[in-house]
Amino acid sequence: MAKAGDEIANPRTGQRMVFLETGEETGGELLRIDSYNSPSAPLESEHVHPFQESGAEVISGSLRFRVGGEERSVKAGKSITIPVDTPHHFWNDGEEVAHSVQWFKPALKIDRFFESYFGLAQDGKLNEEGFPSFWQLALMVPY
């Protein structure tokens, strides 16, 4: 189980996360992570968080978000909020590693999801689009 200060990495995308506050530590209200995204990483797949609002504040670099079909670059010092159940994904659209603080409200069990997902990436158990098997994904849903 993740706790503040724990770090995980996804070798497929090069993304690195450091947990700042976990669901366990906030009574289930919030997950906050430092996220570091490489500029040449494969795109993450578009997805939704059916019961969570999420967002990010870019600390350095730049991230491009596609939220509900609309694209927006978020530069250092700016932030974005993604409403519940809205299709989205993001990628580094700059030339340096992008550092952001990302958050999820309520936390649910998304910290455990990230630990499992990054573990599957380390074990080479994701397909070309970055998805685990259907059955593995069913076990990982963070609700």
Image: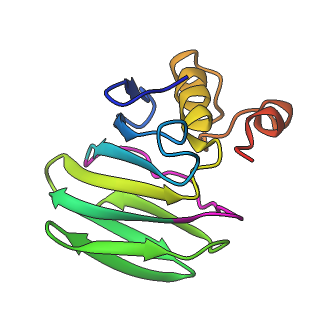
Name the residue located 23 percent from the left edge and 62 percent from the top edge: 58
Name the residue located 61 percent from the left edge and 63 percent from the top edge: 52
Is the residue 129 above or below the residue 7 in the image? below
Q: In the figure, residue 93 lies in which quadrant?
A: bottom left
Specify the segment rendered in magenta.
Answer: 39-53
Q: Main secondary structure of the magenta part?
A: loop
Residue 82 percent across, percent down from the top left: 50, 73
Looking at this view, name the residue that lies furthest to the front.
Answer: 27
- Quarter occupied by the N terminus: top right
Residue 45 percent across, percent down from the top left: 58, 54
Residue 41 lies in magenta, yes or no? yes
Residue 139 lies in magenta, yes or no? no
Is 113 in front, or is 94?
Answer: 113
Residue 112 percent across, percent down from the top left: 60, 32
Name the residue located 64 percent from the left edge and 41 percent from the top edge: 109
Is 5 in front, or is 94?
Answer: 5
Looking at this view, name the residue that lies furthest to the bottom.
Answer: 70
Is the residue 59 above or below the residue 7 in the image? below
Asked if residue 33 shows in the view, the reply is yes
